[in-house]
Amino acid sequence: MGTIEFHGWGARIEDVEKADRLVFDLDPDEGLDFEAVRAAAFQFRDMLQSIGLTSFPMLRGGKGVHVIAPLTPRAEWPEVKAFASRLTQAIAQNDPAHFTAVLSKAKRKGRILVDYLRNQRGATAIMPYSARSRPGAPVAAPVTWAEMKTIDAPSHFHVGDAPELKKRAASKALADWGRADQFLSDLMKP
């Protein structure tokens, strides 16, 4: 198929109509460094934690980071998308100097786009350990929040790191990465 990058739906095959994760794609403007993305990821983690959702960071292998909140598949796509949209809009309105929810590159100067559209039926997101079709062949990689404090770039890992990535995937630190028994509460639904 000529495929390099693997993207997947945010649902399980048993019921593709119910999301099993929220994905917030933090995509920085060209002029921003990784420190801004790192700070944004922690801000998202803290916001999600304040409403009772555990989240996990994933280096995208490009410029940004995904903040992923796993869900027990109960909520259907329209409510998951509505929740993600409302949360993203609230963060962008609360901190317009750093965040935007507007997709236009011209309107995100100096800010981080929070792409919440990964949270709708048929949308996909890069999968963990997928190689990216970019110079240097970076790999999208799960990391811990502790590692996120010191990691140097969202393209830190590349295909040449396969033995290290395989070892990391089996490590105790990442054993429960992306797993949490949590739901969108009734208060968060539209």
Image: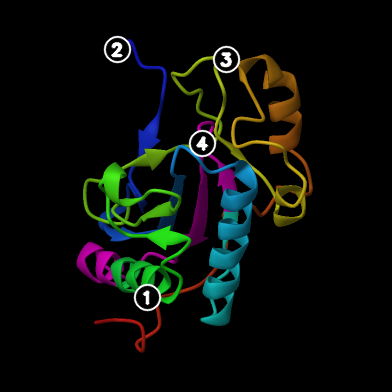
Whether residue 87 sits left or right of residue 136 in the image: it is left
CA distance separating discs 4 and 1: 23 Å
As measured in the structure, the alpha-carbon distance from the residue carrying label 2 to the one carrying label 3 is 22 Å
Q: Earlier in the sequence, mark 3 or mark 4?
A: 4
The image quadrant of residue 7 is top left
Q: Residues within 10 Å of mark 4 (few under 14, many from 20)?
A: some
What residue does disc 2 label? 1
Residue under label 1, please give it: 90
Q: Amino acid at mark 4?
A: Lys
The span shown in magenta is 57-82
**Closest to the observer, 22 or 30:** 30
Q: Regarding mark 1 in the picture, which secondary structure is present there?
A: helix
Is residue 18 a member of the stretch shown in magenta?
A: no
Mark number displayed over residue 79? none
Q: Secondary structure at mark 2?
A: loop
Q: Which residue is mark 4?
A: 63
Up/down of 74 relative to 138, above or below = below
Disc 1 residue type (three-letter): Ala
